[in-house]
Amino acid sequence: MARGRDRHQAHQQALAGLGRVLSRRAGSSCELCGEGAGLRPFEVEGGPSEPDPEWAVLACERCREAMGPKGRWSAGELRFLETAVWSDVVPAQLAAVRLARRVAEAGEGWARDALDGLYLDPSVEVLL
């Protein structure tokens, strides 16, 4: 059991190590909503087993909670997804589209409208 914990801690340290790279890419703001406080790297699901900046976003606490497994969010405070789904940064776009889909499935018309008008590059679409 200690080996599993050690692997988890090493993974978390490697993920935290991406912070500087992600901060430069994001301009020290959340890559989804633009918030500047409480930023930490967040791995986008589906990537490699080791932390990779091409599969991570710099996200604020609100966005991390919304993207997390429990998905705690209030649809009204996620309206920034209307623009985030158009991000040029692939992991940010993936995270935004996936979150917008969850919001749309919860019955939010604005999220459904944002996704209906969205064009995704085929190389990004296969990752969803």
Image (cartoon, helix red, strand yellow):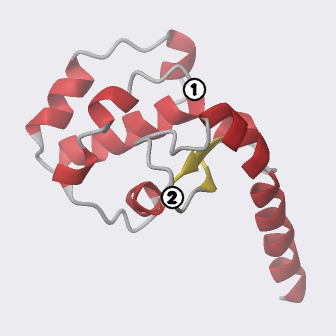
Q: Quadrant of residue 44?
A: top right
Density class for disc 2 (Cα within 10 Å; few <14, some 14-19, many ≥20) is few
Labels 1, 2: front one: 2
Quadrant where the image shows the N terminus: bottom right
**Residue position marked by numbered label 1 in the rendering:** 90
- The label number, if any, that marks residue 115 in the structure image: none
Residue at 11% over, 46% down: 107
What is the x, y in percent for residue 111? 20, 35
What is the x, y in percent for residue 64? 48, 58
Residue at 58% over, 34% down: 91
With respect to residue 51, does 2 lie above or below?
below
Taking 66 as reference, is 22 left or right? right
Q: Nearer the viewer, residue 28 or 50?
A: 28
Taking 102 as reference, is 37 left or right? right
Q: From this viewpoint, is residue 45 visible?
A: no
Q: From this viewpoint, is residue 49 visible?
A: yes
Q: Earlier in the sequence, mark 1 or mark 2?
A: 2
What is the x, y in percent for residue 60? 49, 56
**Residue position marked by numbered label 2 in the rendering:** 37
Residue at 82% over, 65% down: 13
Instruction: Give SS at disc 1.
Output: helix
Q: Amino acid at mark 2?
A: Ala
With respect to residue 51, does 83 lie above or below?
above
Q: Quadrant of residue 71?
A: bottom left
Q: Amino acid at mark 1?
A: Val
What is the x, y in percent for residue 10? 86, 68
Instruction: Give SS at disc 2.
Output: loop
With respect to residue 107, does 94 lie above or below?
above
Q: CA distance from mark 1 to mark 2?
A: 22 Å
Q: Quadrant of residue 100?
A: top left
Residue at 49% over, 11% down: 121
